[in-house]
Image (cartoon, rainbow, N blue to C red):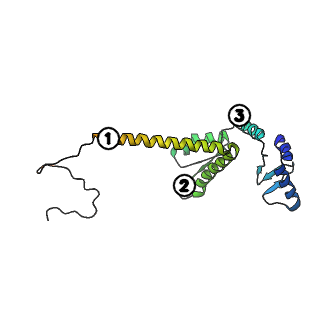
């Protein structure tokens, strides 16, 4: 926290935001009691790659790094059992059960994913996003080639069915709609 606060005073953009907050009370930003510049409830991290790397390292190396604060789940019996509730209580995790009629709960989950995607995009830069998109395109092209190869293999070995008058065959009637009368 202290290194972020020090780095805020070295960042020209954050210093200009700090001045604007003091002059005319810029609504998006605020200055906390300890002098930290925040947006809403989030600490402003300067555009310093080394500092960002340190923050990510610290966040992901701690023992509690991958433990969520809350989990949104459907009402699957596995998640409503007493064992699960006790486990969530012991871990200090809040369990939110969603329903089909309460889209706000489900939207919470989607919003969290979107926020994480935005954060990673800013931290990792557009290069890694482009590399990932390129790899996805290659995978899709290879899947299409494999499907075409399988289709060609099946088409070569396909035989047209030929029937003679008097052959008994089964008819599939399921796509027909309405009443079908035979013998009229």
- Real-space CA distance between mark 2 and mark 1, rounded to the nearest whole angstrom: 44 Å
**Vertical order, 59 against 33 (above or below):** above
Q: Secondary structure at mark 3?
A: helix
Mark 2, residue position: 99
Mark 1 → mark 3, Cα distance in angstroms:
51 Å
Which percent across, then down, holds residue 45?
78, 46
Q: Which residue is at 74% across, 38% downward?
A: 53
The first of marks 2 and 3 along the sequence is 3
Percent across and percent down for residue 180 are: 22, 62
Marking on residue 154: 1
Q: Nearer the viewer, mark 1 or mark 3?
A: 1
- Foreground label between 2 and 1: 1
Q: Which residue is mark 3?
A: 61
Q: Is residue 37 left or right of residue 90?
A: right
Q: Going 61% across and 44% down the picture, which residue do you hit?
A: 130
Q: Quadrant of the C terminus?
A: bottom left
């Amino acid at each position: 926290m202290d290194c972020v606060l020090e780095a805020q005073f070295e960042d020209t953009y954050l210093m200009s935001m700090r001045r604007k907050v003091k002059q005319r009370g810029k609504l998006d930003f605020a200055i906390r009691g300890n002098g930290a510049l925040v947006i809403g409830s989030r600490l402003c991290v300067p555009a310093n790659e080394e500092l960002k790397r340190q923050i990510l390292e610290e966040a992901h190396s701690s023992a509690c790094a991958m433990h969520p604060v809350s989990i949104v789940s459907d009402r699957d019996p596995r998640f409503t059992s007493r064992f699960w509730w006790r486990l969530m209580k012991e871990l200090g995790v809040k369990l939110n059960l969603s329903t089909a009629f309460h889209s706000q709960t489900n939207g919470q989950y989607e919003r969290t994913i979107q926020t994480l995607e935005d954060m990673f995009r800013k931290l990792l830069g557009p290069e890694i996003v482009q590399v990932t998109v390129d790899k996805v395109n290659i995978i899709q092209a290879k899947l299409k080639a494999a499907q075409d190869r399988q289709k060609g293999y099946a088409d070569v070995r396909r035989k047209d069915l030929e029937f003679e008058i008097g052959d008994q065959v089964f008819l599939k009637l399921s796509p027909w709609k309405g009443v079908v009368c035979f013998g009229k």
